[in-house]
Image: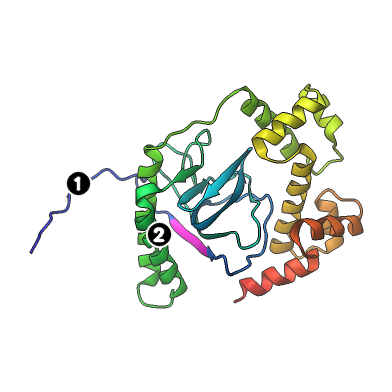
Amino acid sequence: MSQYFAQETFTTIFELNSVPALAYIGKTSQTTTPLPRTFHVHHDLAEIIFIRHGQGTYTINNHSYEIKKGDLIFINSGILHNENNEQNSISTYCIGIKKLRLKSLAENQLLPNTMCPVLQSGMLFSRIHQFFSILAYFVEHNLEPGAAEIGNCTMRSLLVLCRILIDNNKVVLEGEDYNLGLRIKEYIDEHYLEDINLSTISTAIRVNTYYLSHVFKKIVGYSPMQYVIHRRIGEAQNLLINTDYSITQIALMSGYNNSNYFQVVFNTMVGMPPGKYRKSWLNNSSK
């Protein structure tokens, strides 16, 4: 028999007296079709997405990333993000974590906002996959005795493993074009519900329209006006999911004065009209 002794003392990654809570776990596969989400923000939680199979593109904050099998995507609270993948192109696990307080970071932050949020799991792929699989099982069977506690303990163990990966892969995002892209994005994020166009953005940032469009597309992966549309539709999706406002009200609240035009844009972006999207989301949530 082999016997190994556990280390009795260790340094925790969590702030004193803080206990993170698992909000949810989601699982997608190349054989299922999840409801699409465009740009959105989580204000009260952080997310970790694990790419099990396939490849695609994610836009996080103001940068576009090509992702592949084994990648982990860390999304801090308050960070705008969007997946732009062909239907059934990837399989993922996704967890939401509330009340997260890691040492040296703000609440619901997984890593510094200046650090690249996409890391390859490498040799840890199998272990991380196992953690997500165990987590999914106990959340799915949450009525079993002890399931909720096991699920939350597994989530905390997964966080420790992820923190090791983050500490070993500190790649910082910086550069002149990156900073300009960030300025453009910040302006659009403040004014996307208003009547803005490329000319008004260019005037506000004091950069000519050609260079502005070139830099923004290179950094974010979308043209400035495409990004405006994604932000507006993302806001509409949040309102459809979380409120009882009418479609006409949501159109106005999303920056569209014409409800019919809003529904055309929404259908083009999401693949279904806003009313059907709301109904489909509510049906999925009730299962």
> Relative to 183, does residue 280 appear above or below in the rendering?
below
Which dot, 2 or 1, sits closer to the camera?
2
Quarter that holds the C terminus: bottom right
Tell me which amino acid carries mark 2. Answer: His
Residue closest to the eye, 183 or 170: 170
Q: State the residue at coordinates (67%, 34%).
A: 218
Q: State the residue at coordinates (40%, 59%).
A: 129
Q: Which region of the structure is painted magenta? A: 21-26
Label ID, residue 268? none
Element marked by disc 2? helix
Label ID, residue 129? 2
Element marked by disc 1? loop
Label ID, residue 9? 1
Quarter that holds the N terminus: bottom left
Q: Residues within 10 Å of mark 2 (few under 14, many from 20)?
A: some
Q: State the residue at coordinates (41%, 43%).
A: 102
Percent coordinates x, y for residue 96 in the rendering: 51, 56
Give yes or no for contact between labels 2 and 1 (Cβ–Cβ under 8 Å): no
C-alpha distance separating marks 2 and 1: 27 Å
